[in-house]
Image (spheres, rainbow, N blue to C red):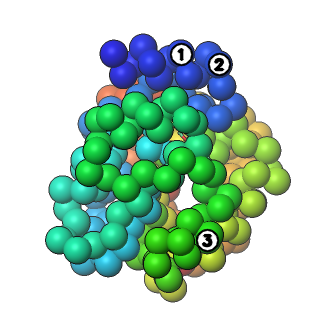
């Protein structure tokens, strides 16, 4: 059901959805690995889509931690809300993350988990969203995002890989998660 809805969104908005299918649980586990979410006071999720990563994030958070997901596609936002009624979801673009955090009384965040399809964004959008990210992420805060293996052969994917070290003081890559359609890896970045 989620896969069908997701595919429909990909067909109608390929440059926003950026994937044919929801992420796998194997990718979700790799994304949250090493984040030490239990120590975080505030966490954001970018582009949760159907919310595959959301439960993996939420189950590690301590009581009282702030957790906000930001999804731009109204149809995926509605699906997400129906399936994750206890998670705070803001239907907006990550470009507005500073305003969103101000509205929710969040000064800065410890960690951001992103599912945004960076490899389909033009450079101006990649930079706009990374600039916005830097306004809310704490010093030493963590930013994780995944990329599809084949995306590294495309120029926006290569450009994104080159941009990350300009924004973060450390950037590393996980090994490839083959049990995902398509195979993917995770960038782990520290501000
Ligand atoms: C690759 S999909 C997410 C897949 C997700 N991990 C899942 O398994 O369902 C990318 C998501 O980012 C969202 N998105 C794209 N641009 C966005 C933006 N500027 N702000 C917020 N969400 C955005 C899309 O609508 C889509 O839900």
**Residue density around tag 2, few if under 14, some if 14–19, many if 20 or more, within 10 Å:** few
Q: How far apart, in angstroms, are the residues tagged by discs 2 and 1?
A: 6 Å
Q: Quadrant of the C terminus?
A: bottom right
Residue most toward the right? Answer: 124
**Which residue is at 60% across, 32% downward?**
18
Q: Secondary structure at mark 1?
A: helix
**Which residue is at 65% across, 61% downward?**
96
Q: Secondary structure at mark 2?
A: helix
Q: Are marks 2 and 1 in contact (CB under 8 Å)?
A: yes
- Residue denoted by label 1: 8
Residue 64 at what x, y percent from top left?
A: 23, 74
- Residue denoted by label 3: 98
Residue 172 at what x, y percent from top left?
A: 48, 62
Q: How far apart, in angstroms, are the residues tagged by discs 3 and 1?
A: 30 Å
Q: Tag 2 or tag 3, which sits nearer the N-term?
A: 2
Asked where in the image residue 169 lies, by quadrant, the reply is bottom right
């Amino acid at each position: 059901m989620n896969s069908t809805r997701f595919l429909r969104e990909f067909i109608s908005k390929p440059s926003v959805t950026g994937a044919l299918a929801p992420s796998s649980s194997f990718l979700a586990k790799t994304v949250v690995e090493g984040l030490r979410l239990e120590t975080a006071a505030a966490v954001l999720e970018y582009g949760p889509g159907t919310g595959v990563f959301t439960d993996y994030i939420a189950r590690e958070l301590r009581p009282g931690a702030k957790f906000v997901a930001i999804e731009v596609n109204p149809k995926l936002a509605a699906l997400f809300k129906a399936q994750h009624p206890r998670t705070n979801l803001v239907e907006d673009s990550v470009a507005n993350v500073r305003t969103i955090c101000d509205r929710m009384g969040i000064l800065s965040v410890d960690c951001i988990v992103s599912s945004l399809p960076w490899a389909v964004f033009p450079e101006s959008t990649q930079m706009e969203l990374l600039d916005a990210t830097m306004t809310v992420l704490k010093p030493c805060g963590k930013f994780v995002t995944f990329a599809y293996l084949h995306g590294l052969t495309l120029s926006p994917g290569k450009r994104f890989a080159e941009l990350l070290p300009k924004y973060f003081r450390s950037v590393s890559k996980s090994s490839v998660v083959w049990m995902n359609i398509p195979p993917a890896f995770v960038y782990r970045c520290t501000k």
